[in-house]
Image (cartoon, grey):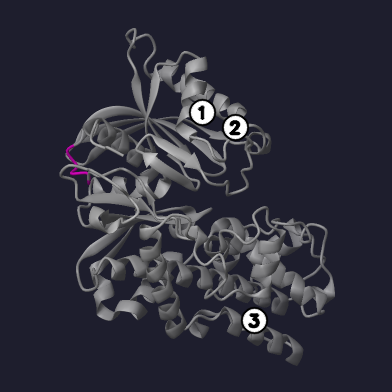
Amino acid sequence: MSDELVTIHDASTEQLFEINEITQEFELKIDKLRKIQNYFMKQLKIGLEKDGQNLSMVPSFVTSVPTGNEIGTYLTLDLGGTNLRVCKVILEGGGKIHIIEGQLYEISEDLKTGDITVLFDFIADCVENLLSKEWGDSIQKNDKIDLGFTFSFPIIQTAINKGTLLKWTKGFTCTGAVGNDIVSILQESFNRKSLPVKVTALINDTVGTALAHAYSHPKVILGAILGTGTNGAYFERLENIKKLNHNFDSSDKMIINIEWGAFDSEKVILPITQYDNKLDKESNNPNSQIFEKLISGMYLGEITRNILLHLIDRSLLFNGLSSKSLNQHYAFETKYMSIIESDNTETLENTKQILENLFHISITNLTDRQIVKRICQLVGIRASRLSSIALASIISYCKMEGNECCIGIDGSLFEKYPNFSIRIYNTLKEFFGENADKIGLHYTCNGSSVGAALAAFSANQSKSKFKL
């Protein structure tokens, strides 16, 4: 790790000692990574055998792997964070896709924290806008447009179009949703507006990413999200899903939504620091989603802020002076880390602008700025290496070491955060040596929307298939 880290010049003995201590806390050597990987793989197996585990291993009821020849036109919704995305997706066959996006709608704090019917009625309004724009009066009486719904929160799924919300994450706390079927609530909102829409499929964004990537890459084994949150979904043999009583005719695989953000929420093996514990205790879901809190873009900035305040409190940064802006929870967003990690100016001028202009730190010297960059690097590197554990675990669990395979990955961290994808690849090389060259890490654009359309297609192909 040390060869990537910024050198800190002109630091005091006390500063160097404390930075060295923090560096050691965040360093993850391969021996530790392998121990976590082994524990992760054991949890995968347990989650397939019984419900109620940290890795929920949610059956998606999507049992067809896309061939690239699927054809059809579908409505799709993607709800999983800050925005709602409504699309018209045309599967053209031959691995070709045409997406007509209506509008990206911001989900306000009132919608995130109000009643679920208010949120879903808002979604119905958004869908109506796209229907009016793209279909107009062409819809015949009694026609129903199939809709695939990407809903990226922990659920227990009992059919391809039924799922009970277990808990909210990502700052959502809507009442009237937990313990209820999300599809039924959404369909009721459509029915109240007399919209010609049928919610045909419910999927997680990782399931969507896996499906979308498989449409053009037949060797995909895993779809992953590395962004505001984190999760993964992979193709599992039905015979290994012990907790599922099933009769699936000729199908032999099903996509499993791992829900790996909750991995090790009991804090048995993950390298939890005091800064992580502070974030966890002050979050709206303490002792939950621990893996996600170490990895995802929603939390990395807050971990960094906690470390900076720790140093300020000991008069080892900014002469011991903080600011009202920096003292505010979640004010130090992950996007600022990204800018700081990318700052290669000799005097770290971009970092200076963020600290002095945005966070109103009265004055910073070069040593301060180098310390801030080092902290951002430590938090970012640890996140990428922990992300690699999840990917390596699925590769090993599926016995794909040494075989050509690919992983479809969506999310802003993987796409935009400096060196994140490179660090993941380098960590996989530590796991698998030269065999890592056979693993493709592919950014999957529009995975949630395309995957939702493919899930709706799959649902139509498999009617009356499931006997539960």
Distance between the Cα atoms at labels 3 and 1?
47 Å
Q: How many marks?
A: 3
The stretch in magenta equals 65-69
Q: Where is residue 328 shown, x and y percent of the image?
A: 77, 57
Magenta-colored stretch includes residue 68: yes
Residue under circle 3? 22
Q: Secondary structure at mark 2?
A: helix
Q: Secondary structure at mark 1?
A: helix
Q: Quadrant of residue 36?
A: bottom left
Instruction: Report if the CB atoms under discs 1 and 2 are less than 8 Å apart.
Output: yes
Q: Secondary structure at mark 3?
A: helix
Camera-side residue: 15 or 67?
Answer: 67
Residue under circle 1? 185
Q: With 15 as the anchor, is 213 left or right in this view?
A: left
The three-letter code of the residue at mark 3 reads: Ile
Magenta-colored stretch includes residue 396: no
The tag earlier along the polypeptide, 2 or 3, is 3
Distance between the Cα atoms at labels 1 and 2?
8 Å
Is residue 225 visible to the viewer in this orientation of the structure? no
Is disc 1 surrounded by few (<14), some (14 to 19) or many (20+) residues within 10 Å?
some
The tag earlier along the polypeptide, 1 or 2, is 2
The three-letter code of the residue at mark 1 reads: Ile
Q: With 375 as the anchor, is 251 left or right in this view?
A: left
Q: Which mark is residue 116?
A: 2
